[in-house]
Amino acid sequence: MLTPGNSCARRPCRRSRSAALLAAVAVLLLMQTLALWNFSGLDSSASRERREARGGELARRRLQRKGDTRIPPPPPLKSAARNQLHADSYHSHRPKEKLHSESNNNENSVPKDFESVDGNSNLARRPRPKLKPDKARGAAPGKDAARVMEAKKPHLPRATAAPAANVSGSVPAATEAASSAARSGRKTPQCEVGGKEAISALSRARTRECRQQIVEVYCKHKERALMPERVPRYCPVEGKVSVNVHWEESPADVSPAAPVRIAFVLVVHGRASRQFHRLFKAVYHSSHFYYIHVDQRSDFLHREVLHLVAKYPNVRATPWRMATIWGGASLLTMYLRSMDDLLKMDDWSWDFFINLSAADFPIRTNEQLVGFLSKYRNMNFIKSHGRDTARFVRKQGLDRLFFECDTHMWRLGDRKIPEGIAVDGGSDWFLLNRRFVDYVVNSEDALVTNMKRFYAYTLLPAESFFHTVLENSALCQTMVDNNLRVTNWNRKLGCKCQYKHIVDWCGCSPNNFKPNDMPRFQSPQQPSRPAFFARKFEASVSQEVINQLDSYLFGPLPAGTRGLHSYWENLYDEESDGVSGLSDTALGHFHAFARMGLSRAAQSLQGQPHDHSCRYASVNHPVSVHLYFLSDQFQGYLVRHQSLNRASAQTETLETWVSSKDHYTVPNPPPTVNRLQHVQVGTDWDPKERLFRNWGSVMGPQDEPVAVQRWSRSQSNLTATVVWIDPTNVIAATYDILVDAGAEVTHYRPPLTAPLRPGVWTLRVLHHWNPLGQTRFVVSPLEFHRQQPIQREDAVRLHAGPLRNSYMEQSFHGLNPVLRLPVSLGAVEEAEANAGLTGAPLRRWIDSLLQIHWGASDVCSLGPSACSVMQLCHMTTWSANSPDPKSDLTTPSQSGRIR
């Protein structure tokens, strides 16, 4: 029976509604599954708020296992687009290898054309690569490269590794965080932590103290007790103020009647002490002051700086040291503390504050800089982002709450910009006059105090704090939109999200200058845009441009200057680092390199079996290791080690120079059309500078190698197949790369299952299964495990290769006939026997493998030697102990300069 107004019978309608409900539930579950692939995207603040409750399910599951029991289910998410692997991109199915922990050199992270705004969450699962151009994909025998097996799915990042859970409730403050607060006497925050970003931060933080701090910051922010809601503006002028200054150098500018005095704050880290010495020589003058902060983790460089401080009365090092990180709030704290110190130094009377890093170098002389600043002594020189403030806020993450602990900047959610002020920002390299420095350090007005509160929880605060305070203060009319620097931005290469291991955001970094950039420094400058410094320079990438700039500013060094084109950079120092500062792979290699040097010394006694004057035995671990470059080309490692002379029974300190051999080959006869120029395999690939930071490709069984191909440009695209072959002819991986016509570099890290089998590996590059070129590389066994001689149990586990010879989920065994790779039972048996070696047999195996890729070029002694043919290190041209006048620090001349 039909009722009025109803178009269906009651039972069919009920069934229809039930079916619709079931369908809705099914769609909900499907969308929850798809949600794992879309934790971040470019969206508005409102859409980010809607995501707060839905993206953190997996991190909630992890916290639940720690004692948090009430977790709400996530609403459905949109399906995300899959990640693309471009020919010049860097992709891995595994967590990223560790980058240098001392990446604390903050840069302007928001160049005007960098559009990666909300892809800045590092919480998303890495999507599976599609089989499109510029993708790496598995190859199958007998098929065209466009029809290949799909690569292995990527692993989940740490924050999303747990399966989704369908539970209800909300996440309270973590149990152990609360107990930690009780033990420390702090009040436990009375709030429930929600939102995927805060929950993810809690799940990833390493220490209990950091987790407790995250909870406290989150709860204070939720209670609106953390951020100022309104801040007064004291600038008497409406809108943004920027004074235009002009500079056309004249004799009066070079020699002003009342020259300003400058306080240089040098913020340095890393190990490039000789490059730092060259910067110091270039900017030094006895009339100015130099305050040096060395990162807390850079003990070797700190020791070098203390030697420098002892030599010059106008140079001091901060008595405190901080472990500052890229984008961290600690960098602003370090600057403010340095400014406070300088203001309290009664014996240092300075007019301007200038911050420099070791990657800076002057492009004008000190006299020119002093003449310019003396003319504009009341101005503050600071580079602004431009006109689009809303865009700057989004890209810079100023509308997000960040907190630094565990040497990481954690993203905890959204926040609002305080009302009443105009937010500004740009570069964190600036020149500020003393009056403004005193204001930001000592003022207790509402602008300064509230901005210090706001920027304590801000990403990249040094790139915005000084700008915002200056623009809104009574000193706003002293702002010059120019930080007097030339920065080498390459947007395509510099915006690679290379700091995700230390900050929950993406950023950009300048590239290093090269010799062909010299015209940018020598050409006449626009009077309205003068510049006195440039960045970045890195001598291990190109020292030649520093040589040219040094010669341009101060005149060439005398003809025949020793070491002019040589560069040495310390990699390890036993006194400052200890053996724990080396990985097991590096430690084993350096021991093997030392043995190569002893073998070379003994070879000088060929035909004299009873003469032991040049025969040595190794003693202890290496003393130091240096990288050696000549004319901007890596020449090898310099390993300093102590060895016992068998003839004199005395211990001598020797230095061995080992250089690597290139094993790239092309087929014979070569293919008629071949764009491939070179193939290299290594670790620690730097996509910005397009080089391996692991110089010489020192690799062990637990490393994650990257294959890099360099191509010549062409008129057409090319599909290349890359094949990885282990020492027993097991095909570990194969994939295709579409090489664009204009591509110069392609690189990819396949998701190989560790441990890699030690031995000589082969990497082949083919086109339609015809060889284009190949290279061989060595995966060395480990002589040490946790800095101790490896035991048999660990050796078998680490040297036997992956379980069932499966480097990936796919088996590529069917490709062996296509690639003409015979399965050698002898090689398999030899690999199995070698896997259990320890002691002297293991060392012989390591030495035999490394001799394929490395060779001892020379050896010298730091002191008198019983070996009559042994040369002294300071007499060579290659030793780290040989003369290096360009980096030596001498007494100032009558002019007050060193250089």
Image (tube, grey):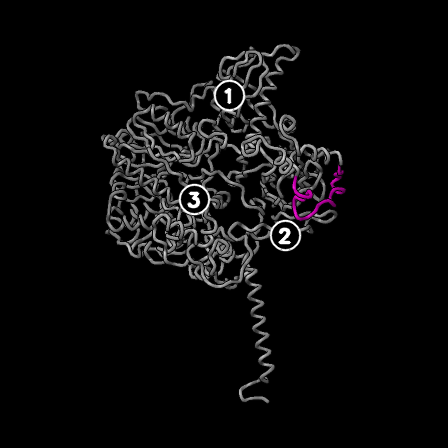
Residue type at mark 1 is Ser
Q: Position of residue 530 (x, y in %)?
A: 35, 38
Give the quarter of the figure containing the N terminus.
Answer: bottom right
Q: Is residue 181 visible?
A: yes
Q: Is 509 rendered above or below residue 182?
A: above
The residue carrying pointer 1 sits among few (fewer than 14), some (14 to 19) or many (20 or more) residues within 10 Å by Cα, namely many
* Residue denoted by label 1: 879
Report the residue at 30% width, 27% height from top: 314
818 in magenta: yes
The answer to which of marks 2 and 3 sits earlier in the sequence is: 2
Residue type at mark 2 is Leu
Report the residue at 50% width, 58% height from top: 57
* Residue denoted by label 2: 131
Q: Position of residue 730 (x, y in %)?
A: 70, 40
160 in magenta: no
Q: Which residues are magenta?
A: 801-824
Which image quadrant is residue 247 in? top left
Give the spatial CA distance, label 2 vs label 3.
39 Å
**Circle 1 or circle 3, nearest the eye:** 3
603 and 91: which is toward the camera: 603
51 and 280: which is toward the camera: 51
The answer to which of marks 2 and 1 sits earlier in the sequence is: 2
The circle on residue 406 is 3
Report the residue at 47% width, 23% height from top: 564
Q: Position of residue 414 (x, y in %)?
A: 40, 56
Give the spatial CA distance, label 1 vs label 3.
39 Å
Q: Is residue 40 visible?
A: no
**Circle 2 or circle 3, nearest the eye:** 3
The residue carrying pointer 2 sits among few (fewer than 14), some (14 to 19) or many (20 or more) residues within 10 Å by Cα, namely many
The circle on residue 298 is none
Q: Is 868 rendered above or below residue 279?
A: above
